[in-house]
Image (cartoon, helix red, strand yellow):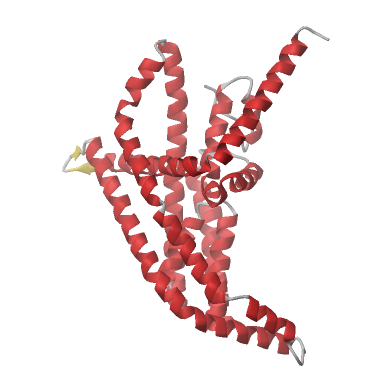
Amino acid sequence: MSETAPARIGAFTGAVLIAALTLYLLVEGRELLIPLAVAIVIWYLLNALADFFDRIPVIGKKLPHWATLVGAVIIVLVAMALVAELISDNIAQVAAAAPAYQANFEKLIQGASRMAGFQETPDFARIADEINVRQLISGLAATVAGFAGSLGIVLIYVLFLLIEQGSFEKKLDALFPNADKRQEVRDLVHRMQVQIQSYVAIKTLASVATGGISYIILLIVGVDFAAFWGFVIFLLNYIPTIGSLLGILLPTLLAVVQFATLGPVLAVVIGGGATQFLIGNVIEPRLMGTSLNISPLVVLISLAVWGTIWGLAGMFLSVPLTMIAMIIFSHFAATRPIAIILSGNGEIERS
């Protein structure tokens, strides 16, 4: 056995232990880590908005950064307040409309059984009895309301991140007295900040467009709670691939139980599908350019892994977390091959 073999075995064993410990901490500490991760994404969004406002001249001058940051915070808080009001208003309306949806659903089951040539439909009737549409819709609304209710701790984290960001440079200077090492870490952090801010900003813009257009389509068709579903589609657009499918499927299911006719359902499917395809596959990739250099297969695997570890929140955060991991892996020679595997075209930026 060569002299380097024990060292390689030791390094491999250490890497496995670190990976296992990290996975354990991610799972066991998810109650603490998920709100913190969401807060960091919102913090990046606030800074992206502030940077956008920095580029807007006001009477020939640029606003100070603190003013643009305050403006970004106000916009996000107003948006959250409107969302909370939208959710609370729709919960009662959903519960009131659910019995009518249940009745339409049972009619659809009976009609489908007759078209299939069944004289009696005991199995379909049992399915209709077991699938309580009112309970399903009310459960979905309660889940969204619970998610909105957990934003309190997230906002506290965001507040402290905004307070602390002014002292980041001083802490960096204290942590790394060596100028070369300090600049190396600063470049690494800057890369992560630029790429994540770019991703969050473009994804938010695409999600707003997708949710807004979907809302108009649902409103024209006459689907109930069009504004609520527009907001849900906006959120789902942050989830790669699966989010787009759910953004079409969920409103379509509501159209099925609401109208019980083919025309409105087809309008929702075609309109929603065209919107998702145009924005998700044409406009968004052009806006992203090469900033999101992650393999599509890796995105799907990341979605499954983070969804397993952190549930729905992990699905929302899967791409930013993978992006951070790829940047960190590309920084060190030993882990650079992992970054190349994660990348979309095999080309990574070297630190």
Q: Is residue 41 left or right of residue 28?
A: left
Give the residue at x 36% y 49%: 152
Q: Quadrant of residue 281?
A: bottom right
| Nearer to us in this view, 230 or 150 | 150
Report the residue that reaches farthest toward the bottom.
119
Can residue 334 be seen from the camera position used here? Answer: yes
Give the residue at x 51% y 65%: 140
Q: Name the quadrant of the N terminus.
A: top right
Return the x and y of residue 180 as percentages of the image width and height.
44, 12
Give the residue at x 44% y 40%: 36
Return the x and y of residue 179 as percentages of the image width and height.
40, 11
Report the residue that reaches farthest toward the right.
1
Label total for image: 0
Report the residue that reaches farthest toward the front.
28
Whether 103 is drawn above or below 211: the answer is below
Whether 19 is drawn above or below 217: the answer is above
Q: Is residue 322 left or right of residue 74?
A: right
Return the x and y of residue 108 as percentages of the image width and height.
63, 84
Give the residue at x 75% y 12%: 6
Return the x and y of residue 312 as percentages of the image width and height.
54, 52
Can residue 260 be seen from the camera position used here? Answer: no
Q: Is residue 173 left or right of residue 345?
A: left
Report the residue that reaches farthest toward the left.
59
